[in-house]
Amino acid sequence: MTTLLTTHDVAAIVAAHGLPEVLRRMEAAITADFRRWSEFDKVPRLASHSSVGVIELMPVADAEHYAFKYVNGHPGNARHGLPTVMAFGVIADVATGLPRLLGELTLTTAMRTAATSVMAARALARPDARTMALIGNGAQSEFQAIAFAHLLGIRRLRLYDVDATATAKLMRNLRGQPDLEIVSCASVAEAVRGADIVTTVTADKRRAAVLLPAMVEPGMHLNAVGGDCPGKTEVHPEVLQRASVFVEYEPQSRIEGDVQQMAADFPVTELWRVLSGAAPGRVAADAVTMFDSVGFALEDYAALRLMGELAAGLGLGQQVDLIPTLRDPRDLYAELLPAPVLRQLRRA
């Protein structure tokens, strides 16, 4: 039997534990798996691009579990009443190939993206960071804001989106967050001025320079989340040249991240090396650091396993016959026989 986790199960998990606590556990789970990076079999995700979006498969495995995520990215989906990003994932036993867990990853991806952003900022941003600019106020923005407020101590949030209704939505959803000052700004430049952390999470599938060199101040940490496929960027190349740039999985980031704009020998550091102590992160208070985040399968593996564990603890999820249970594993055809015939054969 395979355990199925639906969006309702994930919502029930968040209701039971609270979103900040789920994000806290997710950051811890992802960090733990990044620190055992060498134990995983890794490949860049497989992408099928079209003029309106992308559909991807993201696999990863260790000696015990194999996992993959199916995910899309269609910026125009709001016109159809659909999310920009939709996803589900599977965890299977390496020893047998049996799928143990089939789970939604649309809500969970938003949480794991925010948790990963915090994980990187904890390693790279100044410890005294208290102000964050959030550029792009769409579906991911609440998760980023709540994660940074509760897990990293952000107290001032400066918002900007080309769509003023998105900012209004975000401010409405964040109403009541304790000890969080929220300001709507008229431009990117206004939002980032004086910020310790700048998070860009825009959705347009095009080469863009949302963050310009003149906007970057000494000591900033840049959390570039929106550039996640070929031909889609958010940060001006000169900003990357000024910063120490950190990525998840370099072979994938070179294709999809903001570093796709740079020469093949442009230096980047995989984040796992900082988390495991193999490489330095921030080297000075006035240094500019950048996490060029595209999302990596290992994050989904950790998040899906965590949600499975939390669901089991709450008695959530249903058992489904995704794989047939056979009396004779070599007789698959018998599963298609009419029930009376099958019963008669089993009595024989």
Image (tube, helix red, strand yellow):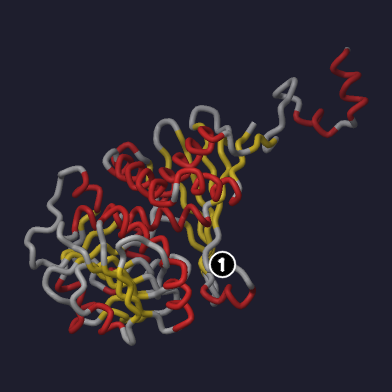
Residue 61 percent coordinates (x, y): 42, 40
Q: Quadrant of residue 282?
A: bottom left
Task: Tell me: residue 281, above or below residue 262.
Answer: above
Q: Residue furthest bottom?
A: 186
Q: Quadrant of residue 116?
A: bottom left
Residue 53 is left or right of residue 208, and the answer is: right
The C terminus: image quadrant:
top right
Q: Nearer the viewer, residue 37 or 146?
A: 146
Q: Which residue is mark 1?
A: 83
Q: Which percent across, then down, holds residue 173?
A: 46, 67
Element assignment for label 1: loop
- Give the position of the N terminus as an image quadrant: top right
293 up-or-down from 309: above or below: below
Q: Is residue 70 visible?
A: yes
Q: Position of residue 314 (x, y in %)?
A: 54, 35
Q: Residue at x 26, y 64 (%)?
A: 155
Residue 291 horizontal side relative to residue 203, left or right: left
Identify the residue at image location x=43%, y=46%. 303
Along the viewing direction, whichever of 224 and 345 lies nearer the viewer: 224
Q: Residues within 10 Å of mark 1 (few under 14, many from 20)?
A: some
